[in-house]
Image (cartoon, grey):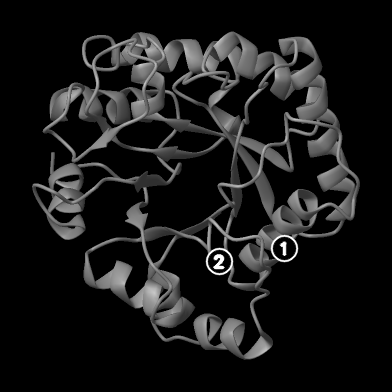
Amino acid sequence: MIKNPIGAHYSIKDGYLGAFKLALSDGADALQIFAKSPASAKFREVTKEEAEEVLNWEDRKKIRSLIIHGSYLINLAEKELGVDSYQIKSLAEDMRNAKALGGDGAVVHMGKSLDQPNDKAQGNFIKNIKTLLKATEGVKAKIIIENTAGQGTEMGHDLNELADIYKKIGDTERVKVCIDTAHAFGAGYDISNNSEGVITEIDRLIGIKNIGCIHLNDSKKPLNSRVDRHADIGVGEIGLKGLIHFVEALKKIGGEDIPLILEVPQESADYASQIKKIREA
C-alpha cells in the first residue's frame, strides 16, 4: 500500500474550496491547482475570505498537500528579470497564495534557453530564482523547480544540469525540485524498466529530501523521445508496473511523504479510478 499523499490537478472554476472538495471526493489527499489562468498575464490574489473558507473547512486536514502550478507564460531562463517584472510578481503571488491556503509551494518550469548559450540561460534562471526568493522573504512557501522532457531548447531535462542549477541557487530550504515521470522518461531515464536506478540517480544528484513533489504521469511517447505528452496511468509507454516500482523505490529511501500529483488526460479513466489504481497497487 502506497502511503504518499496522492492527488491530481484540479480546476478552480467552482472556487478554491470547490477544488479541495472535488479532490477529496476522488479519494485524493493531495491536489495541484492553477491559482489563476495559466495562459494569462493577469494576477489573482487569494482573498482573505477565500482563504478562511478553505482553512475553516471541516475536512481541510484530510488534504495533506497543496501545490500551485505557475503560469505557462513564465520563462526564467530568457533574461535577467527585475523584482517588478510580471514573471517574478506572478510567482511571488503563487507562493503567497499557496501559503494563504495552507499549501506547500509553487511549481515553475525550468524554462528555455531559446537562442542563448546554455550557460547564459542557466545564469539567468539562477539569478531570477534568487530575485524571487528576496521578493518573498518571510513567505513560508517553497518555489519548486520542475524537470523537463527536453523539447526544443528546454533546460533541466538532464538531471546533472538540473542538480547543478539547484546547487548554485543555494537555498535548499525554500527551493525544492519536482520530478515529472513523463518528462524524465522523455529525456531518456528508463522508469519503465529501471525505476530504482533512476531514483538512485535522483537521490545521488539532488537528494531525496530536496524533492518537493512528483508529477506522476505515464507517457504517450517512447523513451528518450524528447517530447512531453502525458498519458493516463498504466496505458502509456512507462506502464503501471514501472510507475509503481518508481514510487516503491522512492519509499525505500525515505520518500513516503512526497506528494504524488497526476497530470493526466483522463481519456481511459477518471482521476478517482487512477488514484485508486496507484493507492491499491
Residue located 50% across and 17% down the image: 202
In this rendering, the answer to whether 250 lies above or below 44 is above
Q: Secondary structure at mark 2?
A: loop
In this rendering, the answer to whether 229 lies above or below 6 is above
In this rendering, the answer to whether 54 lies above or below 268 is below
Mark 1 nearby-residue class (10 Å; few <14, some 14–19, many ≥20)? many
Residue 8 x, y percent position in the rendering:
33, 54
Q: Secondary structure at mark 1?
A: helix
Quarter in which the N terminus is drawn: top left
**Residue type at the position of mark 2:** Ala
Residue located 37% across and 28% down the image: 228
Q: Is residue 78 something one can see in this rendering?
A: yes
Residue located 59% across and 61% down the image: 40
Residue at numbered disc 2: 35
Residue 263 x, y percent position in the rendering:
33, 46
Residue at numbered disc 1: 93
Q: Is residue 140 something one can see in this rendering?
A: no
